[in-house]
Image: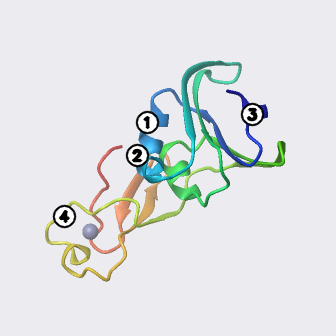
């Protein structure tokens, strides 16, 4: 399977080896009713090795989740067999309903209607903190 075989869909490229599985889980790709291909440990000129995820449908994906797992990843949108958009993502400033706060005393744990919001506290360490209680997000 290569990009040419996708007519309309999304290719997440330049994923660091091992991160494709995390993305697959966090993006909830298993729950989709569309073909998804995950290719791991592909030889890459840029990164040595990389993972690729191909989704055979143009579905809404949470770009912030991709940037959180791997800021170096690129998202390619394919329409009618052609690459129409290529996005570099980078580290998102905020993550909404992606991570759950682990602090049992956090207000977001008992107030069900509150969104789980994390903000980028330290870009160098890729550290995210809960906006409600400032607890650190667990490593991915
Ligand atoms: Zn919290």
Distance from the alpha carbon under mark 1 to that under mark 3? 22 Å
Secondary structure under the numbered disc 2 in the rendered image: helix
Check if mark 4's residue and mark 1's residue have beta carbons within 8 Å: no
Classify 92 as above or below 86: below
Image coordinates of residue 88 in percent, x first then y, are: 69, 47
Q: Quadrant of ligand 1?
A: bottom left
* Mark positioned earlier in the residue sequence (1 or 3): 3
Quadrant that contains the C terminus: top left
Label 3 to label 4: alpha-carbon separation: 45 Å
Q: Secondary structure at mark 4?
A: loop
Above/below status of 21 relative to 127: above
Apparent side of residue 83 relative to residue 65 in the rendered image (left or right): right
Q: Nearer the viewer, residue 88 or 132?
A: 88
| 21 lies above or below 108 | above
Q: Earlier in the sequence, mark 4 or mark 1?
A: 1
- Residue 1: x and y, percent? 67, 27
Closer to viewer: mark 2 or mark 3: 3
Residue 79 lies left or right of residue 27; in this view the side is: right
Mark 2 lies on residue: 25
Helix, strand or loop for disc 3: helix
Residue 52 occupies quadrant: top right
Q: Residue at x 19, y 64 (%)?
A: 103
The residue tagged 1 is: 21
| The residue positioned farthest toward the front in the image shown | 33
Instruction: Give the residue pinned by disc 4.
Output: 103
Give me the C-alpha separation between circle 2 and circle 3. 24 Å
Q: Is mark 4 within 8 Å of ligand 1?
A: yes
Q: Which mark is nearer the camera, 4 or 1?
A: 1
How crowded is the residue under tag 1: few (<14 C-alpha within 10 Å), some, or many (20+)? some
């Amino acid at each position: 399977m290569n990009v040419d075989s996708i007519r309309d869909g999304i290719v997440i490229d330049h994923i660091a080896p091992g991160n494709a599985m995390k993305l697959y889980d966090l993006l909830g790709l298993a729950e989709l009713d569309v073909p998804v291909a995950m290719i791991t440990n592909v030889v890459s000129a840029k990164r040595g090795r990389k993972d690729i995820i191909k989704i055979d449908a143009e579905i809404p994906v949470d770009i912030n989740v991709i940037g959180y797992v791997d800021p170096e990843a690129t998202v390619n949108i394919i329409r009618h067999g052609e690459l129409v958009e290529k996005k570099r993502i980078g580290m998102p400033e905020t993550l909404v309903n992606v991570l759950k706060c682990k602090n049992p005393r956090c207000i977001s744990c008992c107030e069900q209607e509150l969104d789980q919001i994390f903000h980028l506290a330290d870009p160098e360490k890729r550290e995210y903190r809960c906006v409600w209680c400032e607890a650190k997000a667990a490593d991915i």
